[in-house]
Image (spheres, rainbow, N blue to C red):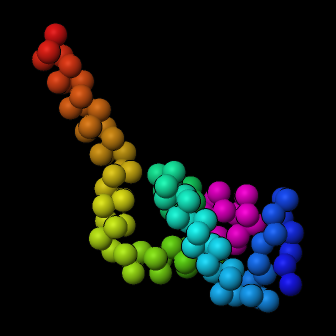
Amino acid sequence: MYHYGHHHRLPCLRCHPHSYIRMVQHLIERCLLLHMSRDQCVKALAKHASVHPLVTLTVWRELQQENREFFHAYFHSISPRHFTSRRTRRVLRLTREI
């Protein structure tokens, strides 16, 4: 019924596909909470949960299609350009105050 990973019981993709997809979705959501990029999420799930990258990418795409506005805002918030511009504005504001 289930196979064992590193101390975790994980659903089997072939035996319980719906449970497996829900698990991958949950793991992706945890990656989003950690502000991880798609590629970081794919690597983390492959390494720590033995989720095949194609499965993660497929579930990610489905989530992205269902939640376009969220992902647009999410990608904007984690983009290096966004961090750089925020950091630059903060430095400029601090230098004006001095």
Q: Quadrant of the C terminus?
A: top left
Give me the residue at 29% from left, 71% from top. 69
User: Can residue 56 be seen?
Assistant: no
Q: Quadrant of the N terminus?
A: bottom right
Q: Main secondary structure of the magenta part?
A: helix
Give me the residue at 20% from left, 32% from top. 89
Left or right: 86 in relation to 64 = left
Is 48 contained in the magenta span?
A: yes
User: Can residue 21 be seen?
Assistant: yes
Is 52 placed above or below 33 here?
below
Is 37 placed above or below 4 here?
above
Q: Position of residue 75 (x, y in %)?
A: 36, 59
Residue 39 appears in which quarter of the rendering?
bottom right
Give me the residue at 85% from left, 59% from top. 7
Is 82 contained in the magenta span?
A: no
Give me the residue at 81% from left, 69% from top. 9
Along the viewing direction, whichever of 51 and 24 lies nearer the viewer: 24
- State the residue lying farthest toward the top: 98
Report the number of discs.
Answer: 0
Left or right: 56 in relation to 73 = right
Along the viewing direction, whichever of 61 and 29 lies nearer the viewer: 29
Residue 25 appears in which quarter of the rendering?
bottom right
Q: Position of residue 78 (x, y in %)?
A: 38, 51
Q: Position of residue 88 (x, y in %)?
A: 25, 31
Magenta stretch?
42-54
